[in-house]
Image (cartoon, rainbow, N blue to C red):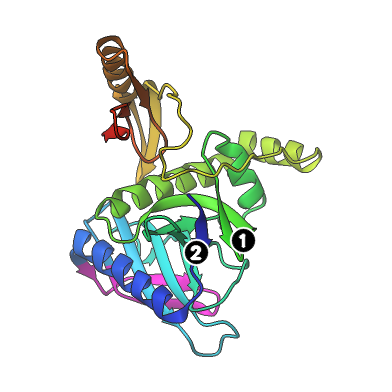
Amino acid sequence: MTLNMVIDRHRIEAAQQQISRIIQSALPNIVSDKVIGFPSGSQNVQFNTLGHGRLYYVYRNIVKDVAEPRHWNTFGFYNEKKQNQDIVVETCIPKSNLNRRTAAFFVEDSASGVIYLAHDGGVGGGYTGVGKTNFRAFYPQKRLIQAFHNGKIYRDGYILGRVDSPALVERITTFAEEVADFKRFIRTPEGQSWANERRNTDSVNHQSIVESDFLSENNYNAEFSGKKKGYKIGVADYISYHGKVVHELQSLLTARNEQSKVYNDRLVDLWMERETASSPTYLK
């Protein structure tokens, strides 16, 4: 499978309408008495959210007084106690053509025609050390995909999800939590020391991986279990058994199905490929 950049104005508009509709439907509470920061100053906007401490979404159609019109999708975690809401991550998408200056973009699976929302990890925050290079280094296990244009690699990034899938909201929430954790870390003395050390050394090489329909790597990688730290409004320590449950299921399937193979990736916790006389069968 090859992922190609989506650059046609009408197809970008259609994909944007899909993600806005899905996100706004999943975040039905509307808040209109809060503000959000723009380069030109704070403005009152409409927030979609599930409530205090939960993901919020703001959409703006940026067309006036800009050289490159774009769709501006903003996410953060709603704090009912604050008038000015903090931006965690933006997914600005140019309305047409190619543009590496925006962090987000749409890609299309050349085989299936499915369109995905992607982000290159270029996060901002107005704080020394916050940026794409450090974000990628902070999450070295996150898999990058390559996006092509005219048969050549144009850029890489992280798949956030299908533009037509309700699961997109959960995946954006996870990505926003990762960005928030990264920004919070950078603001600590330890984070500043880490960022300064990286600034004084060569950047790590981050290998891009082309995922074939997200069923391509033909391997299984154990997922995390144990104590984690989550962040929305405040910090919470908790115990995750997700990796342990997935691993137990993987072991069980492997033992019972000697003629089958079990895999996983960032988008699918577990699937099994069963060879048949005609073609492989995928069970998720």
Mark pair 2, 1: CA separation = 17 Å
Work out whether 219 lies above or below 31: above
Work out whether 130 lies above or below 105: above
From the top left corner, tell me how far across and down residue 74 is, in percent. Answer: 41, 65
In the image, 284: left or right of 148? left
- Secondary-structure class at tag 1: loop
- At x 57%, y 67%, the residue is 102
From the top left corner, tell me how far across and down residue 164 is, in percent. Answer: 28, 61
**Magenta includes 43?**
yes
Q: Identify which residue, 55 or 171, lies in the foreground.
A: 171
- Secondary-structure class at tag 2: strand
Q: Report the magenta residues as a range.
A: 30-47
From the top left corner, tell me how far across and down residue 112 is, in percent. Answer: 37, 56
Q: Quadrant of the C terminus?
A: top left
Q: How many marks?
A: 2
Q: Give amino acid for label 1.
A: Gly
- At x 41%, y 38%, the residue is 215
Residue underneath mark 1: 151
Q: Is residue 226 visible?
A: yes
Residue underneath mark 2: 105
In the image, 227: left or right of 253? right
From the top left corner, tell me how far across and down residue 179 is, in percent. Answer: 48, 48
- Label 2 neighbour load within 10 Å: few <14, some 14-19, many 20+: many
Furthest toward the top, the residue is 255
